[in-house]
Image: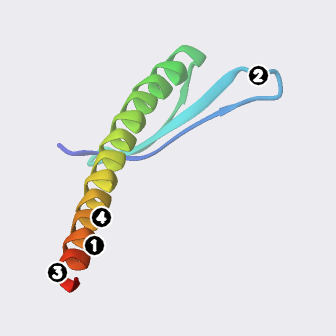
Amino acid sequence: MAIIFKSVKVERDWNGKLKGDLNIQGDFGRASLNLTEELCAKILHVCADNIVEAAEMTATEFRREALQLDAQSVDAIDQST
């Protein structure tokens, strides 16, 4: 039996407390679950760690590409002189 995570929503209410809901779908039908403040905080921690990791990997790849472009520019200048 497959369970499809349709959405997770986490937000702060007017009092600054986290609240959220999780929507899933499967052979059984659909369900929407309210998330406690503790579960919302755990979800945000997991997401934050992965966002930071992905951003670092992306920055590293951008840096590599920029260095290759700089090296190619230097090679092109050297060949033209």
Q: Are marks 1 and 4 in contact (CB under 8 Å)?
A: yes
**Mark 4, secondary structure of its residue:** helix
**Residue lying at 39% horizontally and 43% vertically, measured from the top left:** 55
Q: Which residue is mark 2?
A: 16
Query: What's the amino acid at mark 2?
Result: Gly
Residue 65, x across and y down, in percent: 27, 60
- Give the number of the mark in front: 3 or 1: 3
Residue drawn at 28 percent across, 72 percent down: 73
Which residue has dot 1 on it?
73
Q: Secondary structure at mark 2?
A: loop
Query: Which image quarter holds the C terminus?
Result: bottom left
Q: Position of residue 48 (x, y in %)?
A: 46, 30
The residue carrying pointer 4 sits among few (fewer than 14), some (14 to 19) or many (20 or more) residues within 10 Å by Cα, namely few
**Quarter holding the N terminus?**
top left
Q: Nearer the viewer, mark 3 or mark 2?
A: 3
Q: Say which residue label 4 marks.
A: 70
CA gap, disc 3 to disc 2?
61 Å
The correct choice, above or below, for 9 with respect to 38 in the image is below
**Which residue corresponds to mark 3?**
79
Up the image or down, 61 lies above or below 52; here it is below
Residue 51: percent from left, percent from top = 41, 38
